[in-house]
Image: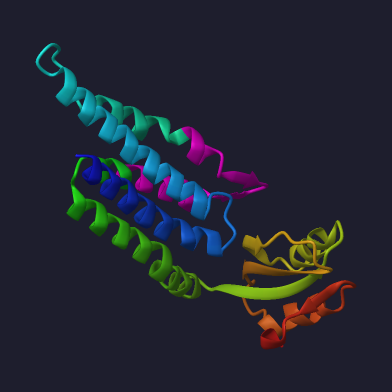
Amino acid sequence: MVWESVLRLFLSMVLGGLIGMERESINRPAGFRTHTLVCMGSTLVMLTANYIFEAYYPQVNLDPARLGAQVISGIGFLGAGTILKTDSHIRGLTTAASLWVVACVGLAIGAGFYAGAVIAAILTYITLILFKKVEGFLNKSAGILEIDLELKNIPGQIAKVTEVMGRLRVEIRDIKMTPTEDPWVQTRFFVKLPHHMQKETLLAELSRLDGVVVSGDEQ
Protein backbone atom coordinates (compact mmCIF):
# COMPACT_ATOMS: atom_id res chain seq x y z
CA MET A 1 0.00 0.00 0.00
CA VAL A 2 2.90 2.36 0.75
CA TRP A 3 4.49 1.82 -2.66
CA GLU A 4 1.09 2.26 -4.31
CA SER A 5 0.75 5.64 -2.58
CA VAL A 6 4.27 6.64 -3.69
CA LEU A 7 3.41 5.68 -7.28
CA ARG A 8 0.23 7.76 -7.24
CA LEU A 9 1.97 10.81 -5.78
CA PHE A 10 4.81 10.52 -8.30
CA LEU A 11 2.37 10.18 -11.21
CA SER A 12 0.46 13.25 -10.03
CA MET A 13 3.74 15.19 -9.86
CA VAL A 14 4.55 14.23 -13.47
CA LEU A 15 1.11 14.95 -14.93
CA GLY A 16 0.59 18.15 -12.97
CA GLY A 17 4.06 19.33 -13.92
CA LEU A 18 3.40 18.56 -17.60
CA ILE A 19 0.45 20.94 -17.70
CA GLY A 20 2.26 23.48 -15.52
CA MET A 21 5.23 23.57 -17.90
CA GLU A 22 3.01 24.95 -20.66
CA ARG A 23 1.73 27.71 -18.39
CA GLU A 24 5.28 28.43 -17.19
CA SER A 25 6.53 28.76 -20.78
CA ILE A 26 4.25 31.76 -21.36
CA ASN A 27 4.92 33.34 -17.95
CA ARG A 28 1.52 32.84 -16.36
CA PRO A 29 1.12 33.56 -12.61
CA ALA A 30 0.48 29.88 -11.83
CA GLY A 31 3.16 27.82 -13.55
CA PHE A 32 5.14 24.62 -13.17
CA ARG A 33 5.45 24.43 -9.39
CA THR A 34 1.89 25.60 -8.68
CA HIS A 35 0.28 23.02 -10.96
CA THR A 36 2.56 20.29 -9.62
CA LEU A 37 1.70 21.08 -6.00
CA VAL A 38 -2.03 21.33 -6.68
CA CYS A 39 -2.06 17.94 -8.40
CA MET A 40 0.00 16.23 -5.69
CA GLY A 41 -2.07 17.84 -2.93
CA SER A 42 -5.29 16.62 -4.52
CA THR A 43 -3.85 13.11 -4.79
CA LEU A 44 -2.85 13.19 -1.14
CA VAL A 45 -6.37 14.28 -0.15
CA MET A 46 -7.87 11.34 -2.02
CA LEU A 47 -5.33 8.92 -0.56
CA THR A 48 -6.15 10.23 2.90
CA ALA A 49 -9.87 9.83 2.26
CA ASN A 50 -9.35 6.23 1.14
CA TYR A 51 -7.14 5.53 4.18
CA ILE A 52 -9.73 6.92 6.60
CA PHE A 53 -12.47 4.93 4.89
CA GLU A 54 -10.53 1.66 5.11
CA ALA A 55 -9.36 2.30 8.67
CA TYR A 56 -12.73 3.23 10.18
CA TYR A 57 -15.23 1.52 7.90
CA PRO A 58 -16.16 -1.20 10.44
CA GLN A 59 -16.96 1.42 13.12
CA VAL A 60 -18.35 4.38 11.14
CA ASN A 61 -20.17 4.73 7.82
CA LEU A 62 -17.92 7.10 5.83
CA ASP A 63 -18.01 8.54 2.33
CA PRO A 64 -14.46 8.53 0.80
CA ALA A 65 -15.50 11.05 -1.86
CA ARG A 66 -16.39 13.78 0.65
CA LEU A 67 -12.84 15.13 1.04
CA GLY A 68 -12.37 15.10 -2.73
CA ALA A 69 -15.53 17.14 -3.19
CA GLN A 70 -14.05 19.83 -0.94
CA VAL A 71 -10.98 20.02 -3.19
CA ILE A 72 -13.10 20.51 -6.31
CA SER A 73 -15.06 23.36 -4.73
CA GLY A 74 -12.15 24.85 -2.79
CA ILE A 75 -9.63 25.09 -5.64
CA GLY A 76 -11.61 28.07 -6.92
CA PHE A 77 -9.87 30.48 -4.52
CA LEU A 78 -6.48 29.66 -6.05
CA GLY A 79 -7.82 29.93 -9.59
CA ALA A 80 -9.38 33.29 -8.80
CA GLY A 81 -5.96 34.61 -7.85
CA THR A 82 -4.70 34.02 -11.40
CA ILE A 83 -7.51 36.01 -13.07
CA LEU A 84 -6.61 39.61 -13.79
CA LYS A 85 -8.93 42.31 -15.15
CA THR A 86 -7.47 45.36 -16.85
CA ASP A 87 -9.82 47.83 -18.47
CA SER A 88 -12.04 45.71 -20.75
CA HIS A 89 -9.70 42.70 -20.85
CA ILE A 90 -9.77 39.65 -18.60
CA ARG A 91 -6.73 37.39 -18.44
CA GLY A 92 -5.98 34.21 -16.53
CA LEU A 93 -9.18 32.27 -17.16
CA THR A 94 -7.32 29.48 -18.97
CA THR A 95 -4.78 29.18 -16.14
CA ALA A 96 -7.58 29.05 -13.57
CA ALA A 97 -9.26 26.30 -15.58
CA SER A 98 -6.01 24.33 -15.88
CA LEU A 99 -5.57 24.49 -12.10
CA TRP A 100 -9.05 23.09 -11.63
CA VAL A 101 -8.31 20.31 -14.12
CA VAL A 102 -5.04 19.27 -12.45
CA ALA A 103 -6.87 19.13 -9.12
CA CYS A 104 -9.35 16.71 -10.69
CA VAL A 105 -6.47 14.75 -12.25
CA GLY A 106 -4.90 14.47 -8.82
CA LEU A 107 -8.13 13.17 -7.31
CA ALA A 108 -8.43 10.57 -10.08
CA ILE A 109 -4.87 9.38 -9.43
CA GLY A 110 -5.51 9.26 -5.69
CA ALA A 111 -8.55 7.10 -6.30
CA GLY A 112 -6.55 4.77 -8.53
CA PHE A 113 -8.29 5.78 -11.76
CA TYR A 114 -5.01 5.93 -13.69
CA ALA A 115 -6.42 5.67 -17.21
CA GLY A 116 -8.79 8.60 -16.71
CA ALA A 117 -6.08 10.72 -15.09
CA VAL A 118 -3.50 10.12 -17.83
CA ILE A 119 -5.97 10.64 -20.68
CA ALA A 120 -7.34 13.83 -19.09
CA ALA A 121 -3.82 15.22 -18.54
CA ILE A 122 -2.78 14.48 -22.13
CA LEU A 123 -5.96 16.00 -23.57
CA THR A 124 -5.51 19.08 -21.36
CA TYR A 125 -1.95 19.52 -22.60
CA ILE A 126 -3.11 19.15 -26.21
CA THR A 127 -5.83 21.72 -25.58
CA LEU A 128 -3.36 24.25 -24.17
CA ILE A 129 -0.77 23.72 -26.91
CA LEU A 130 -2.57 22.90 -30.14
CA PHE A 131 -5.74 24.87 -29.65
CA LYS A 132 -3.70 28.09 -29.74
CA LYS A 133 -3.42 27.51 -33.48
CA VAL A 134 -7.18 27.11 -33.69
CA GLU A 135 -7.61 30.42 -31.85
CA GLY A 136 -5.22 32.05 -34.30
CA PHE A 137 -7.24 30.72 -37.23
CA LEU A 138 -10.49 31.98 -35.70
CA ASN A 139 -8.93 35.40 -35.10
CA LYS A 140 -7.87 35.63 -38.74
CA SER A 141 -11.33 34.58 -39.86
CA ALA A 142 -12.80 37.39 -37.75
CA GLY A 143 -10.40 39.92 -39.30
CA ILE A 144 -8.25 40.26 -36.17
CA LEU A 145 -4.59 41.09 -36.84
CA GLU A 146 -1.53 40.62 -34.65
CA ILE A 147 0.77 43.63 -34.36
CA ASP A 148 4.17 43.04 -32.72
CA LEU A 149 5.88 46.10 -31.24
CA GLU A 150 8.95 46.72 -29.13
CA LEU A 151 8.18 49.36 -26.52
CA LYS A 152 10.68 51.27 -24.44
CA ASN A 153 10.28 50.07 -20.87
CA ILE A 154 9.05 53.35 -19.40
CA PRO A 155 5.61 54.35 -18.06
CA GLY A 156 3.02 55.53 -20.57
CA GLN A 157 4.23 53.71 -23.67
CA ILE A 158 1.17 51.52 -24.08
CA ALA A 159 -1.05 54.55 -23.57
CA LYS A 160 0.70 56.31 -26.46
CA VAL A 161 0.07 53.35 -28.74
CA THR A 162 -3.57 52.95 -27.75
CA GLU A 163 -4.13 56.68 -28.22
CA VAL A 164 -2.96 56.44 -31.84
CA MET A 165 -5.12 53.37 -32.42
CA GLY A 166 -8.12 55.11 -30.91
CA ARG A 167 -7.62 58.13 -33.14
CA LEU A 168 -7.54 55.84 -36.18
CA ARG A 169 -10.63 53.98 -34.92
CA VAL A 170 -8.71 50.74 -34.57
CA GLU A 171 -10.46 48.26 -32.28
CA ILE A 172 -8.12 46.68 -29.71
CA ARG A 173 -9.17 43.14 -28.80
CA ASP A 174 -6.27 42.12 -26.56
CA ILE A 175 -2.76 43.09 -25.47
CA LYS A 176 -0.10 40.57 -24.45
CA MET A 177 3.26 41.45 -22.97
CA THR A 178 5.79 39.84 -20.65
CA PRO A 179 6.94 41.97 -17.70
CA THR A 180 10.71 42.38 -17.73
CA GLU A 181 13.50 44.62 -16.47
CA ASP A 182 15.01 44.92 -19.96
CA PRO A 183 15.13 48.37 -21.63
CA TRP A 184 12.67 47.19 -24.30
CA VAL A 185 9.51 45.10 -23.94
CA GLN A 186 8.05 42.87 -26.66
CA THR A 187 4.31 43.58 -26.88
CA ARG A 188 1.67 42.01 -29.10
CA PHE A 189 -1.58 43.79 -29.95
CA PHE A 190 -4.62 41.98 -31.34
CA VAL A 191 -6.57 44.54 -33.32
CA LYS A 192 -9.37 44.88 -35.86
CA LEU A 193 -8.89 47.59 -38.46
CA PRO A 194 -11.66 49.83 -39.75
CA HIS A 195 -13.05 49.07 -43.18
CA HIS A 196 -10.70 50.06 -46.03
CA MET A 197 -7.71 50.70 -43.68
CA GLN A 198 -4.52 48.86 -44.57
CA LYS A 199 -2.24 47.33 -41.98
CA GLU A 200 0.70 49.30 -43.39
CA THR A 201 -1.09 52.56 -42.60
CA LEU A 202 -1.33 51.67 -38.92
CA LEU A 203 2.29 50.51 -38.77
CA ALA A 204 3.47 53.74 -40.36
CA GLU A 205 1.64 55.81 -37.73
CA LEU A 206 3.00 53.71 -34.86
CA SER A 207 6.58 53.85 -36.16
CA ARG A 208 6.50 57.65 -35.77
CA LEU A 209 6.14 57.37 -31.99
CA ASP A 210 9.19 57.80 -29.76
CA GLY A 211 10.11 54.61 -27.93
CA VAL A 212 8.07 52.40 -30.26
CA VAL A 213 9.69 50.07 -32.80
CA VAL A 214 7.69 47.94 -35.21
CA SER A 215 9.08 44.39 -35.27
CA GLY A 216 11.02 43.46 -38.39
CA ASP A 217 8.55 40.83 -39.62
CA GLU A 218 5.75 43.40 -39.51
CA GLN A 219 7.47 45.89 -41.78
The residue depicted at 12 percent of the width and 11 percent of the height is 59
The residue depicted at 24 percent of the width and 59 percent of the height is 119
Q: Quadrant of the C terminus?
A: bottom right
As rendered, which of 75 and 13 lies closer to the eye? 13
Q: Position of residue 96 (x, y in %)?
A: 47, 46
The residue depicted at 19 percent of the width and 44 percent of the height is 112
Q: Position of residue 56 (x, y in %)?
A: 17, 17
Rendered view: 53 above or below 89: above
Residue 78 drawn in magenta: yes
- Magenta region, residue range: 77-104
- Asked whether the viewer can see residue 187, the reply is yes
Q: Is residue 96 left or right of residue 148?
A: left
Rendered view: 26 above or below 136: above
Residue 147 drawn in magenta: no
Q: Position of residue 52 (x, y in %)?
A: 22, 23
- Asked whether the viewer can see residue 65, the reply is no
Q: Is residue 163 left or right of residue 48?
A: right
Q: Is residue 89 left or right of residue 153?
A: left
The residue depicted at 74 percent of the width and 82 percent of the height is 201
- For this orientation, the residue located farthest to the front is 2
* Quadrant of residue 207 within the rendered picture: bottom right
As rendered, which of 133 and 161 lies closer to the eye? 133
